[in-house]
Image (tube, helix red, strand yellow):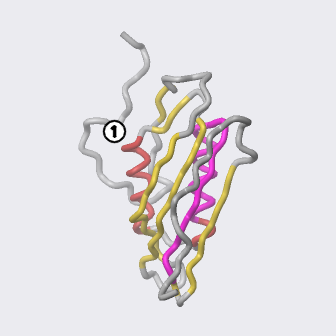
Amino acid sequence: MSDTPAPKFLGANTALPASPDEAELDYVPNPRIGQLYMVRFAAPEFTSLCPVTGQPDFAHLVIDYAPGETIVESKSLKLFLGSFRNHCGFHEDVTVGIGQRLFDEMQPRWLRIGGYWYPRGGIPIDVFWQSGSPPDGLWLPDQGVSSYRGRG
């Protein structure tokens, strides 16, 4: 039996954190440490608030990472992303902030995030951030989200 503590949120009723700052991300040991592989999380219904109008902004987020010693526990990630529902932030700040927080806390070998924001004021905004060059030999599939086309 492992002496690694169980994830905090797994199997427990957990309220949505009031803000991203209050959200706790939970990490567990990487079961394939030393192997190069990629993990993808897609959040096609991500929501935050416009800092100017307070109206909701919607995005499709795609988070790809090559684990190091830990992996993020998916329920805690879901709660973290949900905590943005009442958070005001510009698309760029929200997208890059999510990527940087995950990278800083989890310390993966590599991480990238694509924020595909739906149009506000008629202009779609796509925001991309990565921690650096991907490791040699890492398979990087396309994020699979088309640029916004409108009536095109």
- Residue furthest to the front: 152
- Which one is nearer the viewer's eye here, 92 or 40? 40
Q: Is disc 1 surrounded by few (<14), some (14 to 19) or many (20+) residues within 10 Å?
A: some
Quarter holding residue 6? top left
User: Which of the pair 4/111 is nearer the observer?
Assistant: 111
Q: Residues in magenta?
A: 94-119
Q: Is residue 8 left or right of residue 146?
A: left
Residue 150: horizontal and vertical position, in percent?
Answer: 49, 85
Q: Position of residue 18 (x, y in %)?
A: 39, 59
Is 122 in front, or is 11? 122
Answer above or below: position of 60 versus 80.
below
Image: 31 above or below 146 = above
- Residue 74 falls within the magenta-colored stretch: no
Say which residue appears at 45% left-offset and 81% top-offset. 54
Res 26 → quadrant: top left
Question: What residue lies at 63% left-to-right and 60% top-to-bottom?
Answer: 96
Q: Which residue is disc 1 drawn over?
A: 9
